[in-house]
């Protein structure tokens, strides 16, 4: 009896704790740029979209692939959240403006922008074709610049500050080759801090997440062996490989009122990989 009581108290106590976790996101409006992911898989953008919605935000999932964005929206709705999607190539100025105009026409305000779009590269400067340099730079930086350009004035009009989270990578500070990718992700660190300086007076916080090796469709769709995965785990100080949820949770924290005093921060989420000298594969 006593055991059952303790168990019930623990379960009930934990439940009350979870229900009373208020991130201050209720009725906030968020855009996740690149919030799609293959099938029902959990990428960083999809996890952020789902968790922002679970924390009470209304979420616009923007992605160049309409079907992937719609899957994310359905997953949010299945969990009782509010979301809608829009498709467009966010390297294009008019498409980014369309996304921001759409969110304002739908929900009348904008509070949060998660800039998640990114693709990888593999080669050195000697081997990288010039057009691939342009392509990776375009996709990894342009949507961040353009989405912020149109989002910030609307956040200011909404009258309650705002939060922008830019997704970089530990490759920005601990490159392992992947040279064009690392250079693009390095630029995101300075972009984020410069934006934090420019728009702090408007109450807009701009932070940046540097994910380590996280197990997302982006990495495993190109094939990953058991050996490769254990190398990724061993690279972490806590012998762990992260996943999209780890990055989504960091996005929720940085977007929330819990982080009201946090701006210009470069948040490493990598299980300590960047402090370890072990190769991460
Ligand atoms: N997975 C990792 O190990 C890892 C590590 C470090 C950093 N990251 C970063 O995380 C981010 C990716 O996270 P994810 O798991 O959500 O990736 P993902 O590939 O699952 O999702 C990215 C989404 O962006 C969309 N997209 C691509 N180009 C676009 C464009 N021009 N316009 C609109 N949408 C576009 C894609 O359709 C896709 O749905 C990237 O910035 C990546 O560099 C990932």
Image (spheres, rainbow, N blue to C red):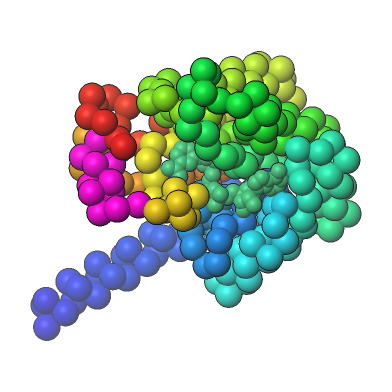
Q: Residue at x 59, y 39 (%)?
A: 118
Q: Is residue 227 left or right of residue 129?
A: left
Instruction: Tell me: residue 27, above or below residue 252.
Output: below
In the rendered image, residue 165 lying in the magenta stretch gets the answer no
Q: Residue at x 39, y 45 (%)?
A: 214
x, y (%) of residue 74? Answer: 63, 71
Q: Which x, y percent locates residue 18?
A: 41, 60
Residue 161 appears in the figure = no
Position of residue 109 in the picture relative to residue 197 (left or right): right
Q: Residue at x 17, y 71 (%)?
A: 6
Q: Position of residue 127 (x, y in %)?
A: 52, 23
Image quarter hosting the C terminus: top left
Quadrant of the frame with the N terminus: bottom left
Does 62 appear above or below 73?
above
In the depicted view, which residue is nearer to us: 172 or 50?
172
In this rendered view, identify the residue nearer to me: 108 or 62: 62
Residue occupying image coordinates x 67% and y 60%: 69
In terms of depth relative to the viewer, which is nearer, 233 or 72?
A: 233
The image position of residue 84, as x and y in percent, is 73, 63
Most extreme residue toward the left is 2
Residue 232 falls within the magenta-colored stretch: yes
Tell me which segment is drawn in magenta: 224-235
Q: Quadrant of ligand 1?
A: top right
Residue found at the very far bottom of the displayed protein: 1
Left or right: residue 124 compared with residue 75: left
- Chief secondary structure of the magenta portion: helix
**Can you say whether 171 is above or below 42 in the image?**
above
Residue 140 visible to the viewer:
yes
Q: Is residue 154 left or right of residue 269?
A: right
């Amino acid at each position: 009896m006593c055991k059952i009581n303790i168990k019930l108290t623990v379960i009930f106590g934990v439940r009350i704790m979870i229900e009373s976790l208020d991130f201050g996101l209720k009725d906030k409006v968020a855009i996740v740029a690149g919030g799609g992911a293959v099938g029902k898989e959990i990428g960083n953008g999809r996890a952020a979209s789902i968790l922002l919605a679970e924390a009470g935000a209304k979420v616009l999932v923007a992605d160049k692939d309409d079907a992937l964005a719609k899957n994310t929206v359905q997953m949010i709705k299945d969990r009782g959240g509010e979301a809608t999607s829009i498709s467009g190539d966010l390297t294009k100025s008019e498409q980014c403006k369309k996304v921001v105009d759409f969110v304002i026409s739908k929900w009348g305000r904008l509070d949060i922008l998660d800039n998640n779009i990114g693709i990888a590269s593999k080669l050195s400067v000697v081997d990288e074709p010039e057009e691939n340099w342009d392509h990776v730079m375009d996709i990894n930086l342009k949507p961040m610049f353009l989405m912020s350009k149109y989002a910030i004035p609307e956040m200011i009009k909404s009258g309650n500050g705002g939060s922008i989270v830019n997704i970089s990578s530990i490759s920005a500070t601990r490159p392992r080759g992947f040279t064009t990718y690392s250079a693009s992700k390095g630029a995101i660190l300075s972009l984020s801090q410069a934006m934090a300086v420019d728009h702090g007076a408007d109450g807009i916080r701009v932070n940046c997440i540097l994910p380590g090796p996280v197990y997302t469709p982006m990495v495993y769709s190109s094939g990953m062996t058991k050996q490769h995965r254990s190398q990724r785990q061993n690279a972490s100080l806590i012998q762990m490989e992260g996943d999209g949820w780890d990055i989504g949770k960091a996005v929720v924290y940085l977007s929330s009122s819990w982080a009201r005093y946090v701006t210009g921060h470069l948040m490493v989420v990598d299980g300590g990989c960047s402090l370890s000298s072990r190769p991460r594969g």
